[in-house]
Image (cartoon, rainbow, N blue to C red):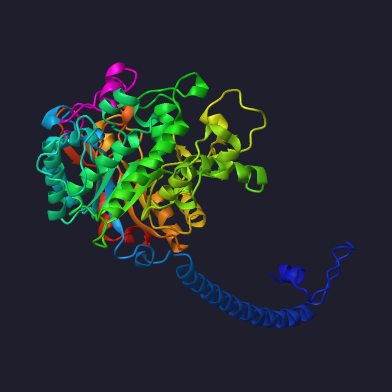
Amino acid sequence: EIGNFILESPYVEDRTQRGDMEVVETTSLLNRADTDSHLRKKKERRCTRCITTALVIIIMIVVVVTIFRCNTQLPPTTNVIFPSNFIWGAATSSYQIEGGKTDGGRGPSIWDTFCLESEENCNGDLGDITDDHYHRWREDVQLMKALGLKAYRFSISWSRILPTGMVNFKTGDDDTNIEGVNYEGVEFYSRLIDELLKSNIIPFVTLYHWDLPQGLQDKYGGWEDRAIIPDFENYARVCFHFFGDRVKHWITINEGWTIAIHGYEEASNAPGLLGKDVGGTGDPYLVGHHLLLAHAAAVKVFRNESYANDGKSVIGISNSGDFRFPLHAESLDDQEAATRAIEFQLGWMTDPLYLGDYPKSMRRILGDRLPTFSSDEINSITGSKPDFLGLNHYSSALASTPTQPPQWGGYWADQLVTLSNDLSWKKTAMGWNIAPEGAKGILLWIAQRYNNPDVYVTENGVAVHDTSSEQAIHDSERIDYLEGYVKGFGEAMTEGVNLKGYFAWSLFDNFEWQYGISKRFGIVYVNYTTLERTPKDSAEWYRAIIDSNGGKLFSSP
């Protein structure tokens, strides 16, 4: 041991490098050993104190960092994000859930015709029954109440109220025997509205959600003819007259962009026309023009004929709004491409109402292919500025400037934009990108462009990959989607966006247009054989969100 100590002690000269270790007297070694033992113990005590001090410092650092993280990284409380009057709801549309194709005097719509024309049009399915809401509306309202919905957005079937689509009615006329009005249809919606109010659920009513009366398509080609404008005005007047005493939230038209592009450009939706620039006869830009003028005509009736005089009734429009990120954030060309892509969708149907004309990018690219507003029409359009903007948002994409001229014509080439996907984004069963960050992005875009209007998210939801009823009911994929998007909308509110409410799409699994019943968007599962309704896990999740006014989204684990 002494030998080992000698070799390790710094107080004994090390001569091993010279290879001539000398013998040292034993007494001297012991003296040195005593001295060095004392020094070593003193050093060990000093090291122990150092270690103790270091541990105390580490503990203090951990405590400080923990406190800092708690104070800076946890999101604000939900009461800051979602005010107490925030409206939580769910949405549907008439053709997608009602059924009752010929019941109660309903006339045919273009979707009845479209689905019958070819099995390829609607996946071989028909909307004759769907969820049979026409007969089960009272049961469905009780389900809404059990889920805690504060509001329910639904649409009125134009051909259920006016089977031919036409009526001659002026405010103040005798309403007991109006030629063209189907009073059984009026009574159906009247009972539904009463039951909603009885259950403390606010009705948000959409006048037009794609199911045009077939009679108007046959008579003059539907939305491609200006004759649709006075007919829509008269239809709106009938709805305001019969339901306006109880309905205080109105939406004129749902997704004009989808009507024009899918119905009159791509032929994937009724009435199934290809656009002129892709070998067909449809004119999507003219259709969009007439939709905006029809909106303006309905708003004029609403505001000028005393339907808004109670100070509580409001009217808006619901527009499609996907978000576009620049493919390369630092590229000015890609930034412009992203803006242009949003302008060709959301801006097309929104700019005229808030800014007085179509986006400049559309004017520049389309030239005389894009209709112009007369001076009277400009006054009508700007005078129909919505009380709120409804936003239907589902997805996002990356946008860049094309490197080569397009090899085809039509709307998608007109934008001069190449769309692509972030490889990290997951896909829905519809093939749409799941990008919750776009929820915040599109609301900020709206706020900046239109001077921060009141906004309701009137649709947001997802069709997920389910292969069985069990998987469809236990829909964790949908919960993840909804949670991410609602958080994104909430984050936009923290930056000042005037978001007033959120409607999940959809309340029920339903008839998903060209996909028939093959795609399920509902938070309530519908067995299409028995028509039994079963709340999915997402419905229970949403009920908890409503109960906490969004607090569950932002609470710590």
Q: Nearer the viewer, residue 131 or 435?
A: 131
Which quarter of the image is occupied by the C terminus? bottom left
Span colored in magenta? 106-132
| Residue 54, position as x, y percentages in the image | 58, 75
Residue 218 drawn in magenta: no
**What secondary structure prevails in the magenta region?**
loop
Question: At 43% from the left edge and 36% from the top edge, which residue is drawn?
Answer: 288
Quadrant assignment for the N terminus: bottom right
Q: Residue at x 47, y 50 (%)?
A: 442
On screen, residue 348 versus residue 49, left or right, reads: left
Residue 124, by quadrant, is top left
**Residue 118 magenta:** yes
User: Residue 267 in the image: x percent, y percent?
Assistant: 41, 24
Using the image, determine if residue 513 lies above or below residue 541.
above
Asked if residue 296 can be seen in this view, the reply is: yes
The percent position of residue 373, horizontal first and vertical second, equals 48, 42
Q: Which is nearer the eye, 453 or 525?
A: 453
Answer left or right for 416 relative to 153: right
In the displayed orientation, state which residue is furthest to the top: 118
Above or below 103: residue 201? below
Residues 464 and 301: in front is 301
In this rendering, position of residue 330 left or right of residue 204: right
The answer to whether residue 350 is seen in the rendering is no
Residue drawn at the location 51% of the way across and 74% of the way down: 64
| In the image: residue 523, left or right of residue 360 | left
